[in-house]
Image: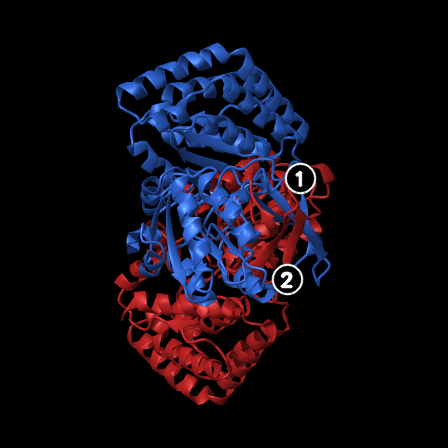
Chain colours: A red, B blue
Amino acid sequence: MDIRAMAQSARKAARQLAVMGTKEKNTILEAMAIALGEHKEDIFKANALDVESGKENGLSSAMIDRLIINEARLSSMQDGLRTMISLSDPVGEVENGWKLENGIHASKVRVPIGVIGMIYESRPNVTVDASGLALKSGNSIILRGGKEALETNKALSQILNEAGIQAGLPKGAVQLISDTDRALVKDLVTMDDLVDVIIPRGGQGLKKAIVSQASVPVIITGAGVCHVYVDKAANLEQALPIIENAKIQRPGVCNAIETLLIHEGVNTKWIESTVNTLQEKGVEVVGCEKLSTIVSSVTPATDEDWATEYLSLKLSIRIVSDLDMAMDHIETYGTRHSESILTEDINTAEKFLNGVDAAAVYVNSSTRFTDGSVFGFGGEIGISTQKLHARGPMGLQALTTTKFILRGQGHIRS
Amino acid sequence: MDIRAMAQSARKAARQLAVMGTKEKNTILEAMAIALGEHKEDIFKANALDVESGKENGLSSAMIDRLIINEARLSSMQDGLRTMISLSDPVGEVENGWKLENGIHASKVRVPIGVIGMIYESRPNVTVDASGLALKSGNSIILRGGKEALETNKALSQILNEAGIQAGLPKGAVQLISDTDRALVKDLVTMDDLVDVIIPRGGQGLKKAIVSQASVPVIITGAGVCHVYVDKAANLEQALPIIENAKIQRPGVCNAIETLLIHEGVNTKWIESTVNTLQEKGVEVVGCEKLSTIVSSVTPATDEDWATEYLSLKLSIRIVSDLDMAMDHIETYGTRHSESILTEDINTAEKFLNGVDAAAVYVNSSTRFTDGSVFGFGGEIGISTQKLHARGPMGLQALTTTKFILRGQGHIRS
């Protein structure tokens, strides 16, 4: 597979996409949505092959579940594309404009990034979502999905391309690397003359490997060691539902919490009953020494626990002596994703909101809202946990950059 | 030198800087500016040592010139710090705010990036400029200057720190790596748990080495293979002054042009006289075959010429058959920095402005205006030629990121 030729063709397509009108892009998105429905049997067939070999290769049932495309999931992919049609096109937005001292008219305009490399694991809906978001924001995309979903991704990409190209999509705008050779990933992430950004989605191992290899800029997404901090001035009636929601409602996602911090001044009976309730609901609780003096049934937490993204029904709990200790803990072990304080004291809340360094900082709320759809971005290509370019849920705007346009009348610099 | 300890202390300082008021930061900047004046003899003495060993080591006179700090340059560093006082503080600016469907109040607020690593060559004014910009935007900075300027940088950094800390600067906010061991650069650019961004300023070799080593995100600045394209509908009276300005006024900077593209329909007499004028003014001209049929005195340009940032009085010229060929040339050989079209045809101008992918795109103007001060940003830490995070001149805002603040009243996700 000639990955350099793929990237060159992506760059060529990107030049066409950059000047394509919103209406034309929406027409292509609609054609893609229709085609997914028309060819659903092909998709199910390809998907069945992946599921079958996944089972043969001993994938966990959770992994198999993430792989499966059924009628409902297919239709949600179609809905996704149609939502993108309804979103406003960020390309061409004028961020600001002014006149330079010398009279040149300047403006800062949103433009597509160019060529996006997307490297992801299992979930095949990413193939459709990422292709649609890239197209709507005027970018080419090179997709490299997990080998578990290869047949499904091939089918999806072929359908998107056939219908898309017929509706005006430039060739090379949406491409799938269908060769599972790992060396190709290295090639992709080091073509800094042709690829503008790499977005990896998947486990920490995948991301670390990419960051250490890449010369193309990388946006790190979805690392979520998130916390809820129960202050001594918390409304304890609100607290338990929030903790349950943040931990239990969907433990496998990055905006769920892994650690609960509790001020030592909080009623010990409440602490005890909270731990008991969580345990009854199937949560494995580990905790600091202080916690075990309050609730004897709790296993001691190790230093590793505080730094671990369980992504499962496991929670570490630490009793802290004050706000500073809570904030220090979050600074040391958090991944700067989503952090929440529960307090009715406005000064404590403000200190937390200002002092905690994370993509999303909450007061009196579950952390589960850090999500492009919930934030009103109409979807997301990932949740950035780094600070450059985009932070938090990345919608269409995060897939654009800006350029300065300067209109002179024979201006020279003196 | 324990570079990890330096980075930890920088991160600690960054937490304090993030919540520091604008007034306090301005007080520190003023104290720094005063101290530079008070200790100027120490600076000149240290600088003399660098200049002396530079001469011993055979540095070019241009390099020596860049190294020298005299009264005028010292005072311009002081002015720079005072300009930063007058700039508005980006930290705390609310980008936008809205209410989520569930009633949570959301806002997107500008916050400092955190810890900046700055790696640069020779010019010691960067030590002062970068420290001031980092401070005003609430960031810690770790400086790694060139070994040619080591004594000067040590003196500057010591003066900034002594005066700064007395005025309230947190320890660790401004640090200089005073050990010239190259291995320390690798350590700095791979501490992605402590350092948030690396900004290299210097030659292409330095930048390539850093990009290939770094796991910390890097912002590439100042690569400038820029073009002026003279369209067939250009105002030729405006054209020569613009070309001279873009090439000759200051050939060693990144927003000067390296290549001139000319539409084949442009009057050949004008082309001839332009080349002659440039040659008379000391510009070495190389060109494509077509050009040599018009002006015989021109040496043939190689493929390498088109891709070279001369940074000197050398210019390559290519005759192109149309706008598309000009844009293809820029796409192939340009570094996406600054590109200008000279034309009186509004449709041609719009096609160029929309179709050319660069940080700054001009019509009927020299490219020399791509500069933070000229753009009104009150200075710059560099000119980004990559697309992520910041593009073009990087002022204070480019040294910040955002965070989402969400205020609920017991909200949970259903």
**Point 44% across, 70% down: residue:** A13
Q: On the rendered image, what quadrant is the C terminus of chain A found in?
A: top right
Q: Does residue B117 appear in the picture of this structure?
A: yes
Amino acid, disc 1: Lys
* Residue A273 coordinates in the image, percent (x, y): 61, 50
Give the image quarter of residue A43: bottom left
How would you rate the neighbour count of disc 2 (Cα within 10 Å): few for under 14, some for 14-19, many for 20 or more? some
Residue farthest toward the front in the current orientation of the protein: B269
How packed mark 1 is, by other alpha carbons closer than 10 Å (few <14, some 14-19, many 20 or more), is: many
Front-lying residue, B363 or B203? B363
Residue B385's place in the image compared with A111, above or below, is above
For numbered disc 1, what is the local secondary structure? loop
Give the residue displayed 48% in from the left and 80% down from the top: A164
Which amino acid does the dot numbered 2 rest on? Answer: Arg
Q: Position of residue A90 (x, y in %)?
A: 60, 63
- The mark lying in front, picked from 1 and 2, is 2
Name the residue tied to disc 1.
A232
Q: Quadrant of residue B143?
A: top left
> What's the distance in space between the residues labelled 1 and 2, CA to CA?
24 Å
The residue indicated by pointer 2 is: B413
